[in-house]
Image: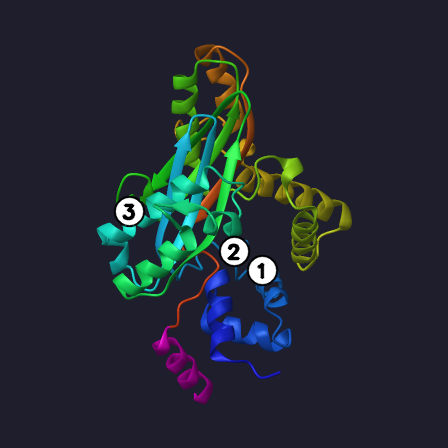
Amino acid sequence: MAITASMVKELREMTGAGMMDCKNALNETNGDIEAAVDYLRKKGVAKADKKSGRTAAEGLVGVEGRGNKAAVIEFNAETDFVSRNEDFQKLVSGIAKVAADTDGSVDAINASDLGGKTVADSVTSAIATIGENMSLRRAAVMEVENGVVASYVHNATADGLGKIGVLVALESAGDTDKLHALGRQVAMHVAATNPLAATKDDMDPDLVEREKKIFSESARESGKPENIIEKMVEGRIRKFFEENVLLSQTFVIDGENSVEQALKNAEGDVGGPIALKGFTRFQLGEGIEKEEGDFAAEVAAMSKG
């Protein structure tokens, strides 16, 4: 199939590989983006596929915390400028508060009351007033029976509003204030490291198998015997878990212990066992691409050359 500029751009943003490498990979895989990612990784050109850099939509991420329950939403607009608009910020904060009283579904939030109108109608009014198209893209609610759901907002533009919002659920019968402080530190860690799963058991098994296949095929290209390849793959998978599973990651706050060990170490101070029940991380615009006309011209020029 014909390889387009937008396909090359998408692969480049997903992998960080060079333009010609991306174009060659797409040609080799008949335009299959996922296969092209694997192709580049086998060749050692691309890093692990996390897609975290594909940020394009503007707006704000909003967080609302209430002790053992919290909500996070992503509300999009057309320009970054609008995120500094006070009325826009009030709208996002209001929707986040409403979200905390729902199951976290976009439909339920849009149908909820916000100042005498539904959220959906409030958004329609804001579009007419501010002059930009905007929408509630997604939301999540976390709750624990005993413990806290701590939150953290990165690049905050106002209280509870920013570019990255994180919720961390910790279950414990210990001191609530200390648990909140600890949870906030873990949420800061999640904002910085963007783990793929909370525990090894939570990791998508298909993703793990895909990683094993990539590591194995890459190792075989070195010409080493199968028993050595098996050990190499085991080591690579162990490192993959250490880098991408929250509990296995090195805690950025102390730079020494794993997150799991850091939680264990804090149990004495908190006054009871601590269990990580999960996390949610929203980064503004992740997975949405923004048009960049000059890139297409660059690719067009490359193809002629």
Q: Which residue is mark 2?
A: 47
Going by the picture, which residue comes out furthest to the right?
A: 226
Is residue 162 visible in the rendered image? The answer is no
Q: Quadrant of the N terminus?
A: bottom right
Question: Mark number for residue 90?
Answer: 3
The amino acid type of the residue labelled 1 equals Arg
Q: Which residues are magenta?
A: 292-305
Residue 189 drawn at (x, y percent): 42, 35
Separation of residues labelled 2 and 3 (CA atoms): 39 Å
Q: Earlier in the sequence, mark 3 or mark 1?
A: 1
Residue 273 drawn at (x, y percent): 55, 15
Q: Nearer the viewer, residue 211 or 199?
A: 199
Which mark's residue is nearer the viewer, 2 or 3? 3
Residue 288 drawn at (x, y percent): 46, 62
Image: 52 above or below 268: below
Q: Nearer the viewer, residue 1 or 279?
A: 279
Which mark's residue is nearer the viewer, 3 or 1? 3
Q: Residue at x 73, y 45 (%)?
A: 230
Q: Which residue is mark 1?
A: 41
Separation of residues labelled 3 and 1 (CA atoms): 44 Å
Q: Earlier in the sequence, mark 1 or mark 2?
A: 1
